[in-house]
Image: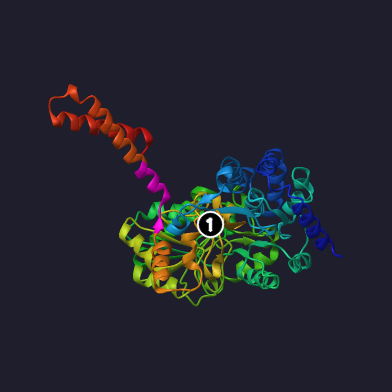
């Protein structure tokens, strides 16, 4: 029996003890995870520095800060998320108890990515713990230092059997994928995502695939190009361009291309100085294989800004490319590096056509002061998300589901969406053994009369909350009328009586929130 098989068996055995069912236990594990991040902040930063050349402050900003927010939100909202959720009834079930009950799926496999080795690996874990699952955590072997720290230190804080960390490369991941899980959560490329989904299909295991793709960025010529380029520069070159939601390429009209290049160049110097290679907050390509891949993508395009590199340090400077077409090499795959191609289009019509001729991206970016233009891009394109007049920041909003569509992924997470994604939302209906006369309409023999009654009871939906409010309103109206009638001798005019009743009813409605 392989190590991976033993780990999964142990996690499933521990899950079947029922220890993850109580919310108190889940909260305890979430607090332990929060303590891990707090206690081991320096270890995490050192590992990310060695993997990606990222600064300590950069690691906190882009790795652990959002993670802490997700954990605190889950702790605060867990009781609400896990509570039964009443649903609308029909007349046939109006006296019954009808609700949705979230319940744990079982054992979840989380396969993390190397570009943000802590955020994209542990954020799904927050959802798995909150939902009451066991989780096998597989950090990417590419970010080897982070994987080692996670393997050595995380078990000191979390239940070792329920939340084991498995390290290794392709063979270890393949062995894990042979095991039966109740959900697989994968972050990475579309190519590997297909392999994960194929492996999951053998056990009919549902998957969440957080993939990537070429996220377009359209710049309207009438927008504030200085501000737009400043935000695009930040979104593109943070983490040395190794961000799944980074703007992959720019679409703009020929009349503003030179201005766009100029403004991006200014922003690069503002953010990373004249020598990004020596600047603390400009990172490195993860390894030499990816360095060579990114460098090869520049073939056939003209370097407008940057283009400098140092293979020995896996360094590629912030680079802007022009004279790029849809057939250029840089447009054949997700860049995942500090190259920003600019493609000229005649306007928003051609930009929308260009986007729609390709796979659905993880995010579409549009910069414009024209709200109608923005709404048109929303209406006429499809993507995991759309962000207008900024980059990346939608990732920070826990209330927004984060995920792709089509080739950019399936499923979503963040906040309550993580909890729901890794829960089974179980339908529950509890009837009483009464009112058999009404139930007889569904028993044979089936007649036209019974069908008519069934149509009435089944197709008439009842909003119980609204009925409750109407009943309260009727009760307060009656009470107000009674009070006014009793005190009516004080008022000589029917108008005065009516005003008094209106004031009483309005006051009661305000007091009760109706």
Residue sitting nearer the eye, 421 or 482: 482
Name of the residue lying farthest toward the left:
493
Which image quadrant is residue 346 in? bottom left
- Give the left or right position of residue 409, taking residue 137 as reference: left
> What residue is disc 1 on?
402
The correct choice, above or below, for 345 with respect to 426 in the image is below
* Residue at 49% from the left image edge and 67% from the top image edge: 442
Q: Position of residue 411 (x, y in %)?
A: 56, 62
Q: Is residue 205 left or right of residue 80?
A: right
What span is colored magenta in the figure?
A: 461-471
Majority secondary structure of magenta residues: helix
Along the line of sight, which residue is nearer the eye, 154 or 46?
Answer: 154
Rendering coords of residue 310 (x, y %): 65, 60
Residue at 72% in and 49% down: 47
Q: Give the quarter of the figure containing the N terminus.
A: bottom right
Relative to 401, is 200 on the left or the right?
right
The single residue placed furthest to the right in the displayed view is 1
Residue 497 sits inside the magenta stretch: no
Figure label count: 1
Image coords of residue 418 (percent x, y): 58, 53
Residue at the far top: name it.
490
| Closer to us: 252 or 483 | 483
Most distant residue in the bottom direction:
327
Assign the C terminus to one quadrant of the image: top left
Q: Residue at x 78, y 43 (%)?
A: 156
């Amino acid at each position: 029996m392989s190590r991976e098989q033993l780990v999964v068996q142990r996690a499933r055995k521990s899950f079947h003890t029922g220890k993850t069912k109580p919310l108190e236990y889940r909260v305890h594990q979430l607090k332990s995870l929060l303590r891990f991040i707090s206690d081991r902040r320096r270890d995490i930063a050192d590992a990310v520095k060695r993997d990606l050349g990222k600064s300590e402050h950069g690691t906190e900003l882009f790795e652990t800060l959002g993670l802490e927010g997700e954990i605190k939100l889950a702790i605060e909202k867990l009781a609400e998320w896990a509570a039964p959720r009443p649903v609308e009834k029909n007349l046939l079930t109006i006296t019954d108890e009808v609700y949705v009950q979230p319940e744990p799926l079982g054992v979840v496999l989380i396969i993390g990515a190397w570009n943000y080795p802590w955020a994209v690996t542990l954020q799904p874990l927050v959802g798995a713990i909150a939902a009451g699952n066991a989780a096998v955590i597989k950090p990417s072997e590419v970010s080897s230092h982070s994987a080692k720290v996670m393997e050595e230190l995380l078990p000191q804080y979390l239940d070792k059997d329920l939340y084991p960390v498995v390290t290794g490369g392709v063979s270890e991941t393949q062995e894990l994928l042979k095991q039966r899980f109740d959900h697989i959560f994968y972050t990475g490329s579309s190519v590997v995502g297909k392999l994960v989904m194929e492996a999951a299909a053998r056990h009919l295991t549902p998957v969440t695939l957080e993939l990537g793709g070429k996220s377009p960025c359209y710049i309207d010529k009438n927008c504030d190009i200085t501000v737009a380029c400043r935000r695009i520069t930040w979104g593109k070159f943070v983490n040395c361009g190794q961000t799944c939601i980074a703007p992959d390429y720019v679409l703009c009209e020929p009349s503003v291309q030179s201005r766009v290049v100029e403004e991006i160049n200014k922003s690069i110097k503002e953010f990373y100085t004249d020598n990004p290679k020596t600047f603390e907050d400009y990172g490195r390509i993860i390894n030499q294989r990816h360095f060579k891949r990114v460098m090869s993508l520049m073939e056939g395009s003209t370097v407008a800004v940057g283009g400098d590199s140092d293979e020995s340090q896996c360094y590629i400077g912030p680079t802007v490319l022009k004279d790029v077409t849809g057939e250029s090499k840089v447009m054949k795959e997700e860049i995942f590096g500090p190259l920003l191609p600019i493609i000229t289009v005649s306007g928003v019509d051609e930009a929308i056509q260009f986007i729609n001729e390709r796979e659905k991206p993880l995010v579409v970016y549009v910069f414009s002061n024209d709200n109608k233009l923005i709404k048109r891009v929303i209406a006429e394109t499809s993507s995991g998300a759309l962000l207008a007049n900024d980059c990346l920041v939608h990732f920070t909003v826990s209330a927004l589901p984060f995920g792709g569509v089509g080739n950019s992924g399936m499923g979503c997470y963040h906040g309550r969406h993580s909890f729901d994604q890794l829960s089974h939302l179980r339908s529950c209906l509890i009837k009483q053994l009464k009112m058999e006369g009404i139930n007889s309409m569904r028993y044979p023999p089936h007649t036209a009369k019974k069908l008519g009654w069934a149509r009435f009871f089944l197709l008439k939906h009842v909003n119980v909350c609204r009925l409750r409010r109407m009943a309260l309103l009727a009760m307060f109206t009656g009470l107000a009328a009674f009070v006014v009638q009793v005190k009516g001798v004080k008022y000589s005019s029917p108008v005065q009586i009516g005003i008094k009743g209106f004031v009483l009813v309005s006051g009661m409605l305000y007091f009760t929130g109706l």
